[in-house]
Amino acid sequence: MAQDQTTFPPFTVTRTAIDQIVALGGAVRVDAENGGCCGTAYVFTQLDESDPLDDGDTRYGCPGAWLVVGSRVGPALPGATLDYGARLKPPRFRVLQNPNTDDVCACRRSFGRPRPGPGQPTCRSYVPMPWDSTYDPPLQWKRQIGFGVEDGTRSDHEVDG
């Protein structure tokens, strides 16, 4: 991921998000995939210096950190704010004040079409970040979406069914 020039993102990255990226080793990738209550879900991945970029990825510099933006989510982020909510349950990155997405889930993890309301089987509100092995979601939510039914865990990709 070496680069000899810093390009700043066309969106705001809060100090708490930068601090979390630094705490994770200095690089995080954000992209989107099908899923979540509103049809398209933000996906965050911890990166290492040796990780190659995917075709279409854009690498942005933030003070002390790198943020890689995937090609699918890139057009949806200009003017938005990337934040990290350490006090949220589970603690997570989230996209706030996004002028490009009218329809957004209340947890700020999915966007694209009108929110169908609470209790959806595709809900990601309590899915921990991929690197968070300590958060235990509420039992009612686990039952609602089938989280951890077989082996006690379930990845973001499996939540969509």
Image (tube, helix red, strand yellow):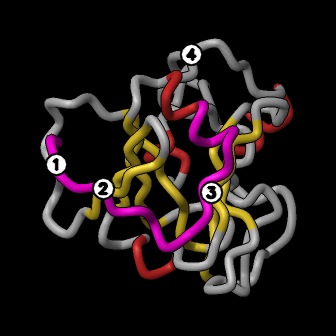
Tell me the magenta residue range.
1-19
Residue that label 1 marks: 3
Horizontal side of 135 relative to 72 (left or right) equals right
Q: Amino acid at mark 4?
A: Ser
Which one is in front in this view, the residue at disc 2 or the one at disc 3? 2
- Classify 151 as above or below 1: above
Which one is in front in this view, the residue at disc 4 or the one at disc 3? 3
Could you say which is closer to the camera, residue 117 or residue 130?
A: 130
Q: Amino acid at mark 2?
A: Thr
What distance separates the C-alpha of mark 1 from that of mark 2? 7 Å
User: Whole-percent x and y of residue 142?
Assistant: 73, 33
Q: Secondary structure at mark 3?
A: strand
Residue that label 3 marks: 82
Q: Which numbered dot is residue 133? A: 4
Which one is in front in this view, the residue at disc 1 or the one at disc 4? 1
- Counting residues from the start of the chain, the first of labels 1 and 3 encountered is 1
Check whether the beta carbons of the residues at disc 1 and disc 2 lie within 8 A of each other: yes
What distance separates the C-alpha of mark 1 from that of mark 4? 31 Å
Q: Is residue 143 visible?
A: no
Q: Any magenta on residue 161? A: no
Q: Residue at x 53, y 63 (%)?
A: 35
Q: Secondary structure at mark 4?
A: loop
Mark 2 Cα within 10 Å, few/some/many (few <14, many 20+)? Answer: few
Q: Work out which quarter of the rendered image holds the N terminus and state it.
A: top left
